[in-house]
Image (spheres, rainbow, N blue to C red):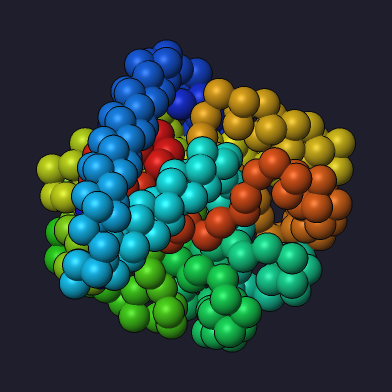
Amino acid sequence: MLQAYFTAPSQTMIVNGEGCEHKLSRQQDCDTERYKRADRYKGKQQAVKMVMTVLFMTILLGVGSPVGNDAVSAQSSAFHMNAADEEQGRRTVAVVIDDFGNGMDGTKEMLKLPIQITAAIMPFMPTTKQDAEEAHRLGHDVIVHMPMEPNKGLKKWLGPGALTTDLSDEEVRKRVEDAINDVPYAIGMNNHMGSKVTSDERMMRIVLGVCKERGLFFLDSRTSYKTVVPKIAAELQVPIVSNDVFLDDVYTVQHISKQIRVLQKYLESHISCITIGHVGPPGKKTASVLQQSIPVMQTNVQFVKLTALIRGGSMNDPLVLPNS
Ligand SMILES: [Zn+2]
């Protein structure tokens, strides 16, 4: 079960995306807080180092003491903490690929990328189980890509088992539970479309309530600037992360390459970034741009699965925002 941490209300800029109308605002404050916490963490590490040094000197003065080995192992663990601290300073990127489950273009290419990704798989589709099993076998994270009603667009675009705001509480709960049951190995959930549902408190209280019961985290794709996900997740204590950059809302190699540059730029002022791409119409193009960009980017960033961001954040400080 993942340890819980909570992100602050959604504040970063989403670079395009369905229902997106905003650029924000309080990211500066949010980052400032995050770096302050990182400083406090480093301060604690330095204090631990000092205590260890004093302890080691004391042991040296009393050679043969039975606690000698403990002191050495304590020093060794202090070293590991410093190494982990350095590692923490490295920028991380989590690539999430949406819309698996329907045998769409780019499915094979995405799963074979030379990094671990997070595969967001739609429930009740022809290749739902096959894609989930293959993604899991290859070491990727699997999450449920839950279809949710958008402000604009037709309900029939959503696919089977979708959440719409006209459903009763009981029906919403049942659909969320059925979707989780339909996607093997799912450890989290994100929204497919959903600008209407993610801004609806009643709906998200049920969705996030089920996530909590089932031990799933929630990735807010942030298709709406009015999202209530951070608020309700904090209330219910459900771990959440959120999208920072959409890679392929325009289906051209030129645009996708531009979004990779946006992502790199974003990392100049953020310690981590979550980016969402898609199988389907842009799938092969997105996979090919990623394939080419990954080796170049790996010189200064580390690609991780979403779970790594969640665990990384909560391990060091339950309040650290791995992404906000
Ligand atoms: Zn989708």
Viewer-nearest residue: 153 or 52: 52
The image quadrant that residue 75 belongs to is bottom left
Viewer-nearest residue: 78 or 99: 78
Q: Residue at x 51, y 43 (%)?
A: 86
Q: Position of residue 135 (x, y in %)?
A: 59, 77
Q: Position of residue 59 (x, y in %)?
A: 24, 56
- Could one spot residue 161 in this view of the protein? no
- Could one spot residue 51 in this view of the protein? yes
Residue 115 placement, left or right of 136: right
Q: Position of residue 281 (x, y in %)?
A: 75, 56
Residue 269 placement, left or right of 233: right
Figure quadrant of the C terminus: top left
Q: Residue at x 60, y 31 (%)?
A: 267
The image quadrant that residue 182 belongs to is bottom left
Residue 307 placement, left or right of 121: left
Q: Is residue 130 above or below residue 217?
A: below
Viewer-nearest residue: 320 or 157: 320
Residue 135 placement, left or right of 115: left
Q: Is residue 63 above or below residue 255?
A: below
